[in-house]
Image (tube, rainbow, N blue to C red):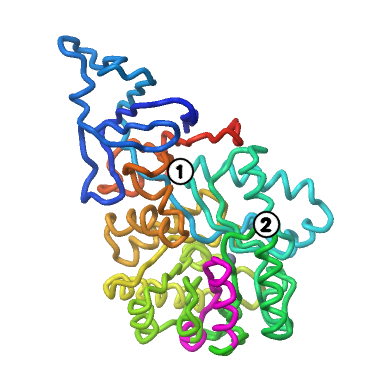
């Protein structure tokens, strides 16, 4: 992977073989991307920049252009990939060890976060949303990258999550005993600078009993109060929720995205399509266990996991056909879901579900940017957007395999962020 850092005070013209802008049916040949002071200003035919009478091609000062012209032979340039659900605080191996490390090895945790941040870039994932932890590790990673302490993707942080004490979620936040307490917590999380709010609405998917989900934590009325407070503070709400009834509660309460959503049914998908509630199905955590034949702990049943994956894939296909907004999120940090490299696994499962490459690539870029509220800066190659771009060798519309090891990451470097991988 080569990193191309674009300086904020300079102008650039990038000339790849082809460009996929996040919209078009196929990558387009013969276009150049113009970037001025960290913003994409336009796409124009390359012919305009070919010096007449030269066969090598590039005129270094076309039409008085004084910036840098960068040919990218063999490269398809496309928007950077976006992961809507990761946990920097988790190590993809052992959650209990990770939680122990938070308290006992903060320097080690910090070093790992730094590695994970680089792994995202190396896998072409230039924007991620962190799904919270009770130590605010994800929020601190966002700040460290923003301050230029180390290179990494743009992080949308949820800080600490809201969950009901005694239910699932004690490693994600401090917990609440009442809605009043939740509202107070939301105010204080907002003060800590979170970008979005994470709420835990149900427990986990059982690996022992097919279709069984941990207890629902809030009623529609309670969750509506939580969502309304977050929205009044300008915060979108991502809801950890599985089971048909808990998903229905979350959608009715007005959350912005359903995370996981295992065992939701057609009725909830209809509601989600109507209300434009996004779905992040996080296929990799169970998919990787099933594909690898991994029994994650004593007593877990691999056939239950495999059946749960199959039903989730069928729902994804149904949701896509119904026009539900689907975003790509890996839940990286969960067991057997490594930061960065599992992104390709997640995309692969959408292929297995029957979605075509255009749908998958759109979800991985333009649509996930909209879900994260980052569509003003990323997810497309168009005037006004920022050049968070990747270059791949080959046509991703023909094969997603070319995304496995992107050749190039293009990143705008702000004055605050001396990017040095
Ligand atoms: Zn998660």
* Residue at mark 1: C-beta within 8 A of ligand 1: no
User: Which secondary structure lies at badge 2?
Assistant: loop
Magenta includes 243? yes
Q: Residue at x 18, y 24 (%)?
A: 47
Q: Is residue 91 above or below residue 273?
A: above
Q: Residue at x 55, y 72 (%)?
A: 232
Quadrant housing residue 266: bottom left
Q: Which residues are magenta?
A: 222-248
Q: Where does residue 419 sit, x and y in percent of width and height?
A: 58, 33
Viewed as shown, does residue 117 lie left or right of 82? right
Q: Where does residue 299 sit, x and y in percent of width and height?
A: 64, 78
Q: Nearer the viewer, residue 322 or 179?
A: 179
Quadrant housing residue 74: top left
- Spatial distance from mark 1 to mark 2, Cα to Cα? 21 Å
Q: Which residue is mark 1?
A: 124
Which label is found at residue 89? 2
Q: Where does residue 155 sit, x and y in percent of width and height?
A: 56, 51
Viewed as shown, does residue 83 lie left or right of 197? left
Q: Residue at x 53, y 49 (%)?
A: 340
């Amino acid at each position: 992977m080569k990193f191309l850092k674009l300086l904020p005070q300079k102008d650039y013209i990038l000339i790849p073989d082809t460009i996929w802008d996040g919209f078009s049916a196929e990558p387009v040949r013969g276009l150049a991307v113009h970037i001025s002071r960290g913003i994409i200003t336009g796409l124009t035919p390359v012919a305009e920049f070919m010096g007449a009478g030269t066969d090598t091609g590039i005129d270094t000062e076309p039409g008085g252009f004084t910036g840098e012209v960068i040919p990218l032979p063999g490269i398809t340039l496309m928007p950077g990939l976006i992961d809507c659900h990761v946990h920097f605080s988790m190590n993809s191996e052992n959650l209990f060890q990770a939680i122990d490390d938070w308290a006992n090895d903060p320097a080690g945790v910090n070093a790992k976060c730094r590695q994970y941040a680089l792994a995202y870039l190396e896998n072409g994932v230039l924007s991620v949303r962190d799904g919270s932890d009770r130590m605010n590790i994800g929020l601190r990673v966002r700040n460290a990258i923003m301050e230029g302490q180390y290179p990494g993707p743009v992080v949308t942080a949820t800080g600490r999550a809201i969950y009901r004490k005694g239910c699932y979620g004690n490693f994600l936040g401090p917990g609440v005993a009442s809605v009043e307490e939740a509202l107070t917590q939301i105010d204080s999380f907002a003060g800590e600078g979170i970008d979005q709010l994470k709420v835990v609405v149900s427990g986990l998917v059982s690996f022992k009993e097919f279709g069984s989900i941990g207890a629902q934590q809030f009623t529609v009325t309670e969750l509506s109060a939580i969502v309304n407070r977050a929205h009044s503070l300008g915060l979108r709400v991502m809801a950890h929720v599985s089971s048909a009834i808990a998903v229905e509660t979350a959608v009715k309460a007005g959350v912005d995205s359903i995370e996981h959503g295992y065992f939701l049914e057609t009725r909830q998908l209809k509601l989600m399509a109507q209300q434009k509630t996004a779905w992040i199905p996080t296929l990799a955590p169970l998919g990787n266990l099933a594909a690898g034949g991994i029994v994650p702990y004593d007593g877990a049943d691999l056939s239950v996991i495999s059946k749960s994956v199959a039903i989730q894939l069928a729902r994804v296909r149904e949701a896509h056909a119904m026009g539900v907004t689907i975003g790509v999120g890996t839940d990286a940090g969960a067991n057997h879901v490594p930061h960065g490299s599992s992104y390709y696994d997640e995309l692969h499962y959408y292929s297995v579900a029957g979605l075509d490459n255009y749908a998958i690539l759109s979800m991985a870029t333009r649509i996930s940017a909209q879900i994260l509220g980052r569509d003003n800066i990323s997810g497309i190659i168009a005037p006004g957007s920022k050049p968070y771009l990747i270059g791949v060798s080959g046509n991703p519309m023909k094969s997603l395999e070319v995304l496995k090891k992107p050749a190039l990451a293009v990143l705008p470097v702000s004055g605050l962020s001396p990017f040095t991988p």
